[in-house]
Amino acid sequence: MRDLFINRGDGGTPKTMINPKGPSHYLFGSGENDSVAMESGLYSRRILTDEELLAFSEVIETDPARLTLEDWQLWTQHAWKTEHGTSESAERFGEKLIEEYAETDAAMLAYLEEPTEQKRVALLSEAGDVLWCLAAGMSNSGVSAETALQSHLMQASMGILIFNNQGQPTYPKWRTTAMETAHRTLSPISLADVDNLILAGYEPQPSLVMNLEEGDEFDGDPVEAYYRWQIDTAIPYSVRSLMQQQLPSEDSGYQGSSSYNRFREDIGLNATYIFLRTAFMLRVVAGASLTDAVAINYAKIHSRIAAGLVDHSDGERPDELL
């Protein structure tokens, strides 16, 4: 699966890294792709072949936990309405993230008030939309979800301490798992790796450098998880603002500048925080995994595409269209 999408850089395979208009080297990846293909009114950084899409489908339908962040992120970029790496696409993904975050908040509250299976599935569906927006938005900003995750976990592992009742500092219980994931080089990070991090006790914190007391650690209460989710409501707005400031115009010379790269780093770290907070919320509130939400999101989008329910315009659309 990884062989299908990895940017080998050997000249024999179309390059598939993020940011099609950017320079050949940047903070969260390398490689370039100057062409943006358009088919049936939808843009794609590279039109994926039927064989590639079939291989992706087989993995996500049979063993979704094995899906890598890299492959999943590429799938979210397969067909967009607006061209990649533009002010229009930054506006679109930023606004969509805000919309889906609010809908997930409402779905979570509804499930907590009446925890039926139908409302649980609705929560996972809305959370999957948030995850899709994060992956697509990071791609639009030239950010690798995998590398951003590793950077986030490295800083958290080095910066967060837990103080016991005697005032002695200790490392969080999840630190070993986080460090192993942060240092991963020989194999890709999968959805299951992120789920295992949450199972190891990791709770994303607003700051990556914090001194916590033992009593501050999360106690597993779903209602408390919802309150913590609400506290973070401003962060999606920050991501939207960063995305829009990063791509203020069609000036291609701006991309690759030091300012552009600083925005990329901030977008990566903030988007990763929402990504991990969503995975944490799913586990605590719904007893579900990141893998569950991504699988539901894929099934929903795939079924709409198969039924021809895709809006090829950039105007208002009926709810049943993508």
Image (cartoon, helix red, strand yellow):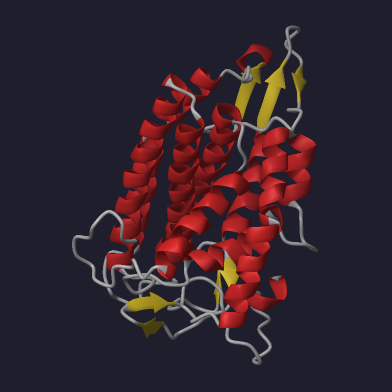
Residue 53 horizontal side relative to residue 153, left or right: left
Q: Residue at x 26, y 69 (%)?
A: 249
Residue 61, percent from left and from top: 63, 60
Q: Residue at x 46, y 78 (%)?
A: 45
Residue 198 horizontal side relative to residue 138, left or right: right
Q: Quadrant of residue 168?
A: top right
Residue 272, percent from left and from top: 54, 47
Residue 47, percent from left and from top: 49, 82
Q: Residue at x 61, y 31 (%)?
A: 287
Q: Residue at x 31, y 71 (%)?
A: 82
Residue at far top of view: 166
Q: Quadrant of residue 137?
A: bottom left
Q: Is residue 230 above or below residue 157?
A: above
Q: Nearer the viewer, residue 268 or 89?
A: 89
Q: Would residue 251 be seen by someone viewing this image from the given angle?
A: yes
The quadrant of the image that shows the N terminus is: bottom right
Q: Quadrant of residue 153?
A: top right
Residue at far bottom of view: 12
Give the total of numbered labels. Answer: 0
Q: Is residue 271 above or below residue 19?
A: above
Residue 242 horizontal side relative to residue 196, left or right: left
Residue 223, percent from left and from top: 49, 19
Q: Would residue 208 be seen by someone viewing this image from the given angle?
A: no
The quadrant of the image that shows the C terminus is: bottom left
Q: Nearer the viewer, residue 13 or 166?
A: 13
Residue 181 horizontal side relative to residue 142, left or right: right
Q: Is residue 250 above or below residue 135?
A: below
